[in-house]
Image (cartoon, coloured by chain):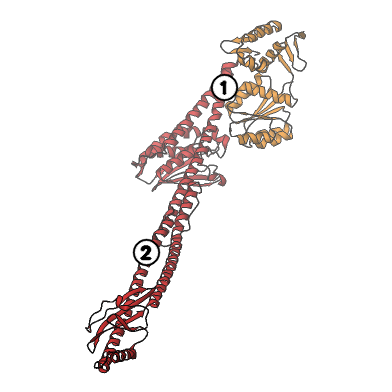
Amino acid sequence: MKLSDRITILCSSVLAAVILSVTVALLLFAKNTILSLSNEQVQRKQQTLRTSFSEMANYYAANSDSDAVHTSLVRYCFTRFSDQTSVLMKDGETVVSSVIVDPSAYVQKDGVDYGEATPVAVTVQGRRLLIAGSSTSVGGKTYDVYVVEDISDVYSRIQRMAWIFAGVSVAAIALGAFVVMALVRKSTKPVTALSEAAREIADGAYEKRVAVRTKDEVGRLGEDFNRMANAVETKISELEERNERQRLFIGGVTHEFKTPMTGLLLHAGLLRRANLSEDERDASLAHIESQTAWLERLTQNLLKLFTSDDEIELQTTHIPDLLDEVKDGVEPKLMERGATLSVVCETETLILNGDLIRSLLNNLIVNAANAYDADAKEKPITLTVKGKTFSVSDHGRGIPKEAQSRIFEPFFRVDKSRSKKQGGSGLGLALVKAIADAHGAVITVDSEPDKGTTVSVTLP
Amino acid sequence: MKNRILVVEDDAAIRDAVLLNLQFADYDAVAFDDGKKAADALEDDHAYDLALLDIMLPGMDGFELFGLMEQYSIPVIYMTAKTDSASEIKGLRDGAEDYIVKPFDPLTLMVRIEKVLKRVGKWNAVYRVRDVVVNTETHTVTKDGEPVELQPLEFDVLIALLRHKNMTVSRERLLSEVWGFDYLGETRMVDVKISALRRKLGLEDAIRAIPKLGYRLEER
C-alpha cells in the first residue's frame, strides 16, 4: 500500500472519529436541553393550572349544598383555566378532559400535597407525551389535576436536527478526507519524484536531477539527493574517463610493442631459415639487439609509470645534492649528443621523492638535448631551481602550438621518426606528468618554434 | 624481368628484414623510411608492380600515400600494427588490395604478394634458379635450354620452394601450399617429390634438407 494512502486513511479516520464524537455529544446535549426545557414548561403549566383552579374552586364550590352543584361548579372553575392539554380527575374518574389518554395510568398521584409534580415522558399510540399531575382538595374532596403535553413535534424536531447533524458531519468528514488526501499527495509527490529519479539514475541516466524546491525536510532531502547525484555523476565520468585513458594507453602499449616484436620475429626467422651472408647475419643480430634494448626501455618506463601511480614517499631532500646526482646521471647522454648543462640552484631543501624527481629531471634534460638539431654547434641546457619550481630550458626547435597540449600523452610524438632514432620510448613525458601528478605538482610548458622550450614543474 | 616492389616502412629492423625476404624471392625491392620521401621519389620513378605500406609513417602516412599509388596504378598491401578493424576497413574500402597485421610471417607475406600480383596481372611468370627456368604460365620447365618433364605435384613443390627461395620451408608448409590442409601429417609425400626434383633437375646440392626445419632451395 502506498505511503500516501496509508497517511490519508489514518488522518481521515482520526478526523471522522473526532467529528462523529463531537456531533454525538452536541446532539445529546441539545436533546437534553430541549427536553428539560419542555419538562420545566409542563411542570410550571401544571402548577399554575392547579393553583388557579384550586383557589377559585375553594372560593366558589367549597360550601355547595349538593354534589351536583359542587361538581358543576368545580367543572366550571376548571374550564376557566383549562386548555386542550388539561385533565381533571376525581377518584380515578375523568371530570374534564380533552386528551385521548388516561393520565392517571402513568402518574403516581402525589396526594394532596402542593409539592412538585415531576413530568413523566411516555409514548402512547406513536405520540410522545409529557404528563405532569398532582392532587388538590376542593371542599374536602380530592381532585387530580393533569397536564398532558404532546411533545411529538419537539421529538421530531430533535430527530430532524440529528439527521442534519449527521449529514453535516458526513460532509465534513468527506471534505476533510479529501483535503487530507490532497495535502498528503502534495507532500509525497516530491518523494515519488525522488524515487523515479533514483531509478533513472540507477539505469544509467547520471545527469538526472530532481526539482524539489519546498522548504521542508523533503526539500532538504531533494537537495541532498541532487548533491549525491552530482557526486555520483562526477565520479562516474571520472571513472569513465580513466577507463578510456587506460584503454587508449593499453592500445598504445600494444601498438608500441608490436613494432619491435615484428622486427624481432622477422630477423629471428631470417637467422633460422635463410642462408644469410656473414654481413647479413651481423645486421640481423644488431637489429635483434637494438629491438630488444628498445623493448627493455619500454618495459622499464612502463614499470616506473605504474609505480609512480601509487602513494609515494616524500622526504625532506637537500636540493644541491639531488641536482649533482641528476647531472652525473645524464652526463653520458649529454656527451653523446654534444649538449652542455648548466645548473642554477637557489633552493636549499624541498619535500619530495628524490628517486622520482631525479627521473623526472633526467627525462626533461634528455628531451631538451634532443630538441636541438643533430648538427647544432652549441646545445646549451639550463636547469633552474627557484622556490618550489624546477625549470629545464633549451634553445632548440620548440614545440608547435597545436602539439603542446598533447606532449604528455603516452606515445605521442611530435616527430615520430626523429624521436625513435633518438631512442625515445614515447613514455618520457608521460612519466614526467605521472611523477608531477603524484607530487601534486603543476607543469607549465612555455615553447616557441625555433626559439626553444622551458618546462617548469612547481611543487605544491 | 623481376617484379619491382616499393616498401615504405620507418622501422629499420622491419624494413631490412622485408627487403631481404623480397630479394631472396627474386623481387627487385626499393625502400623508404619516410612517407614524404617516398612520395617525392615517385614523381621521377613510379614503375612499381606493388607497394608495401606501413600506415603510421613520418612525413606522410600510408593512407595519404595511397592516393598517389592509385594515381600510378600501383596495387597496395598495408603492413599495419593497428589491430582495430576501423583502420583495416578504411584501408580496404579505399581500395587497398590486401593488408597484413604486424607481427606477420614473412612466408605469408610472400604468398599474399604473389596473389595480388597475379590478380592485377603483373605477375612475372618466370622463375630462375641456376640453369633451370620455370614458366608458371605455360607450366614448362627447362634445364640448360632442354625441356624437363615434371609431374604436376613435382611442379607445385618446385614453385613453393622457388617462391620462398633461400628460406627454409617446413614440410608442413609445403604440404599446405601444394596439397592443401587435408594432407597435413603425410610428410613422406614431400620427401618423395623432393628427391624426384633433385634427380630430374640436377639440383642435388641446391635443394638442401635443413635438419628439424625442412627444405631450402639455395642460390647464393
Q: Which residue is mark 2?
A: A17
Separation of disc 1 and disc 2 at Cα? 97 Å
Q: Which residue is mark 1?
A: A267
Residue A162 pos. (x, y %): 40, 71
Residue B114 pos. (x, y %): 69, 23
Could you tell me which chain the residue with mark 2 belongs to? A
The C terminus of chain B: image quadrant:
top right
Q: In the rendered view, does A53 fall on the left or right side of A191?
A: left
Q: Please, what is the three-letter code of the amino acid marked with disc 2?
A: Ala
Q: In front here: B99 or A259? A: B99
Residue at image point 43% right, 43% down: A437
Q: In front here: B111 or A460? A: B111
Give yes or no for contact between labels 1 and 2 (Cβ–Cβ under 8 Å). no
Q: How many marks?
A: 2
Q: Colour of chain B?
A: orange
Q: In the rendered view, does A116 fall on the left or right side of A304?
A: left
As drawn, the chain in red is A
Nearer the observer: mark 1 or 2; the answer is 2
Q: Secondary structure at mark 2?
A: helix
A410 relative to A119, above or below:
above
Q: Please, what is the three-letter code of the amino acid marked with disc 1?
A: His
Residue A276 pos. (x, y %): 60, 16
Among the 4 quarters of the image, the one containing residue A111? bottom left
The N terminus of chain B: image quadrant:
top right
Local crowd size for mark 2, using a 10 Å CA cut-off: few (<14), some (14–19), many (≥20) = few
Could you tell me which chain the residue with mark 1 belongs to? A
Residue at image point 60% right, 16% down: A274
Q: Secondary structure at mark 1?
A: helix
Residue A107 pos. (x, y %): 28, 77
